[in-house]
Amino acid sequence: MVKITKEAALEYHENGRPGKIEVKPTKPFHTQTDLSLAYSPGVAFPCLEIQNNPDDAYKYTDKGNLVAVISNGTAVLGLGDIGALSGKPVMEGKGLLFKIYGGIDVFDIEVAEKDPEKFCEAVERIAPSFGGINLEDIKAPECFYIEERLKKNLDIPVMHDDQHGTAIISAAGLKNALEVAGKDISKVHIVVNGAGAAAISCTKLYVALGARKENIVMLDSKGVITSDRTNLTPQKALFATDRRDVHTLEEAIKGADVFVGLSKGNVLSQDMIRSMAANPIVFALANPVPEISYEDAMASRPDVLMSTGRSDYPNQINNVIGFPYIFRGALDVHARAINEEMKMAAVKAIADLAKQPVPDVVNEVYHVNELTFGPSYFIPKPVDPRLITEVSAAVAKAAIESGVARTTITDWDAYKDRLRQLLGQETKLTRNLHATAAMHPQRVVFAEGGHPTMMKAAVQAFQEGICQPILLGNPDRLSRLANRLKLDLTHIEIVDMRADKEQGRRATYAKHLAEKRARQGYTFEEAYDKMYERNYFGMSMVEQGDADAFITGLYTKYSNTIKVAKEVVGIQPEYNTFATMHILNTKKGTYFIADTLINRHPDQNVLYDIARLSSKAVKFFNVDPVIAMISYSNFGTDEVGSPQKVHAAVAQLQHDFPDMAVDGEMQVNFALNKELRDDKYPFNALKGKDVNTLIFPNMSSANGSYKLLQALDPDAEIIGPIQMGLNKPIHFTDFESSVRDIVNITAVAVIDAYVEKIKTKGL
């Protein structure tokens, strides 16, 4: 798990614009006419329409995509009653998750009121603004009353996520874990340690799935909740047991099939797990310290099925798997409530998703993703891009069928397509890159280990489980820098390529390079001298198998790096050049742009290779390439200069690869507007297709285009440069790369290295 420091967290929240969310206009506002339509006098017309038909608020305002995240700060995370204002960073964070996972707008509202009646009155007064209300961090037992009253009095979805989010995800996990264990939910004995809002809601949902109350034992801080105890809340009384032979957790868990912990850390021992029935299911969900550690639970017996609330272990119970998509589905049918049918639909959709083949950014033929339904994978990963379509659609259908929807959906395929497009590909692609790399972490050499940005990126990549970093540099200097940056290098290898102890390795690398480049005039002595340079030494580590991938570029000029790469690792034999591309993730979709770095003035043959390399690279990211070859003219209207060489390259590509979706030359606006392109040039080979890959006629135009777009749209995610065509995973950054940029490139390099290993082994 990534170690989060106080300093890093405060810097994250303070830097740039304070906080994590903002409001942005969605309509034109540049002219006086725009402003008159947006406000007075034009705004009067939708106001009157809504007065005549209140449901028209969904038509003319953001109500149908707006959720209020509301809290009084009485039970904030593990911090307790810290007050409404102190809980605001959490509510903003929840708003961020709603937006990035579900495309849902959020206002976070902190209500300084602990009295449940007055709190409900405040929420009821503001409810008309919203399409849904997410209650958050409100302590029990008040949270039960608050939710029930608001659900009764309001005609929009209301959900206390601390209760139902955990319940829905854990119920989906339990459903699948029981299937893996070969057990019947109606017969299993369940121990629930904890009796707060989440525990009560979870247990209710387990009963709805088929668990029998008489087979459930619940414990609170005083021990087993028995029916003879006095002063029980109605919620606890619901699950009080008539058994008199159990009083402690140790007694209750003997022979049990399932343990669900929603309590505190380190209360469950290995001996307790050993006393459970065969194939025991252990959900240790206390955060950040579970009731028993994953390692201790797995070591206690080989047949345990384990789940925690942590991201660094299998089968994470994470509310983000549920709430963005539950609200998404509810909002899309203008639901009046989130009812039990909708919750159960979410449970089943999440459970079913874990049984489907797992998608990956890498093309299926590489078989990089090995997750399959079973003991180590019975809950979908939070980064699974199918959650928004499967869960949201299931919830929307349940809302329609149960009669709480104001509107209906008839074309479910079109609805799912809209959901896929809602967020663009940005967050899904980046998250999947990281998740895929973390499945097969590789040894990655970071050339400029002494650069603060590079060191931070290496440490972050290690903390995220993406790679095992190797830093090139002087150990003492790197240690001083790490101390200054408050970075832990304990588990990170440092290689001082200039140290005396590296003489043997330098000699080996030099011998190999001299032999490889003998016909280019290299001598051993010259090659040996080169091995004092970080790029020669680091790339040689990869070439000789002492590392799997190499990251460079913060200090070194590209021209020198390109020269070294050609000398040390070489170009793949089926190509005459190598190239780079940048990925632009925008709200309109994902675009691949080449060549942004390597080939300054490509001729027809180089453009031909760049297009082939780009096609292969786009498929690497599990996307079908649709390639437009760009110029300043369209389809032969200019027969000299760059249009001519682009035109010739396209003709050669179409002849040699008739199944490749490629055409040009064409202007950028025709490439990106298929209606314009198909109407003006109906003969084009991309008819009806959305272009996702742009090949520019020279490096200046490619590089300038992606940087212009980056500058104009700060929300666009840029990943790159991504190397295409070298024999080994050698990847580049540049001097303005951020820590995040380098970590993204590292993830690409790791996947590249793993794929290379698979191909080498013939798998």
Image: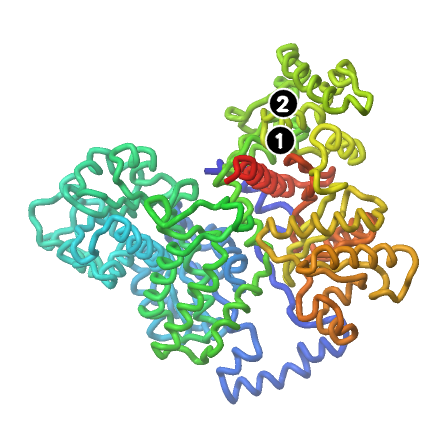
Q: Which quarter of the figure has residue 325?
A: bottom left
Sort mark 2 into few (<14), some (14-19) or many (20+) by Cα contacts within 10 Å: many
* As drawn, 45 above or below 666: below
Q: Which quarter of the figure has residue 587?
A: bottom right
Q: Tell me residue 670's x, y (percent).
A: 77, 67
Q: Which of marks 1 and 2 is nearer the N terminus?
A: 1
Residue 268 seen from this side: yes
Mark 1 touches mark 2? (CB < 8 Å)? yes
* As drawn, 210 above or below 720: below
| Amino acid type, label 2 | Leu
| Amino acid type, label 1 | Met
Comparing 188 with 148, the one in front is 188
Q: Tell me residue 78's x, y (percent).
A: 38, 45
Which residue matches tag 2? 478
Most extreme residue toward the right is: 640
Which residue matches tag 1? 455
